[in-house]
Image: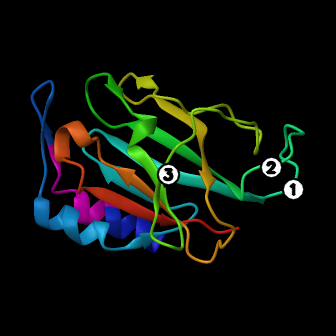
Amino acid sequence: MKKKLLVIISLLLITLTGCSNYTYDEEALAKAQKQIYHIGDTVSCPGYDVTLVDTKINNNGEYAKSGLQVSDPQWITAVLTIKNTHDDTITFYGSDTKIENSTGEIIEKNTFTYDVLGYELLGSPELTPGGTKTGYVMFSNTNQDSSNIRLRVSCNEQILGSSSYFTFKIEK
């Protein structure tokens, strides 16, 4: 809760102006992005909040909730809740999520998906003001070392640029 409050306070300087113009305090955003967040933490991007609800790591040979056997070294699933905090309809792009594995490889989300945690696919929801969606994004890791896996959530690359992201620790 303390981390959530710190993120909210440090990012209160981010303001939304006009119908589609976003402004933000680069220094506050940079400071908040240096932290590592965990399950239950919420981060604020201009226009929306992202909460990491749950994670699951399935290793090769294990069975996912869907009954499918994991054929890759690992399947990594993250359940996110996205909340629109803007006055206009926004779209959260599922492609703004990536995994960084223990070897430093950055992995894009899968185009194929399997029900691992009982949630629906997050996709790229369009949300009206105050609207929320909870769903999962899934990744196929290239190795089974889950000691230092991190989820990167970019703050809409079209607005802030590709170097702007928050990091969540994926815990088994």
Q: Are marks 1 and 2 in contact (CB under 8 Å)?
A: yes
Label 2 vs label 3: CA separation?
26 Å
Q: Secondary structure at mark 1?
A: loop
42 to the left or right of 142: left
Residue at the far bottom: name it. Answer: 147
Q: Are marks 3 and 1 in contact (CB under 8 Å)?
A: no
Which residue shows up at 85% across the image and 43% down it? 65
Numbered mark located on residue 51 in the image:
3
Q: Mark 1 is on which residue type?
A: Gly
74 shown above or below 38 = above
Q: Based on the displayed image, in which of its 4 quarters is residue 90 positioned? A: top left
Q: Secondary structure at mark 3?
A: strand
In primary-sequence order, the first of circles 3 and 1 is 3
Numbered mark located on residue 70 in the image:
2
Q: Mark 2 is on which residue type?
A: Val
The segment highlighted magenta reads 8-15
Q: Which residue is mark 1?
A: 61
54 shown above or below 21 = below
Residue 93 included in the magenta stretch of the image: no
Label 3 vs label 1: CA separation?
30 Å
Residue 13 included in the magenta stretch of the image: yes
Q: Secondary structure at mark 2?
A: loop
In primary-sequence order, the first of circles 1 and 2 is 1
Label 1 vs label 2: CA separation?
5 Å
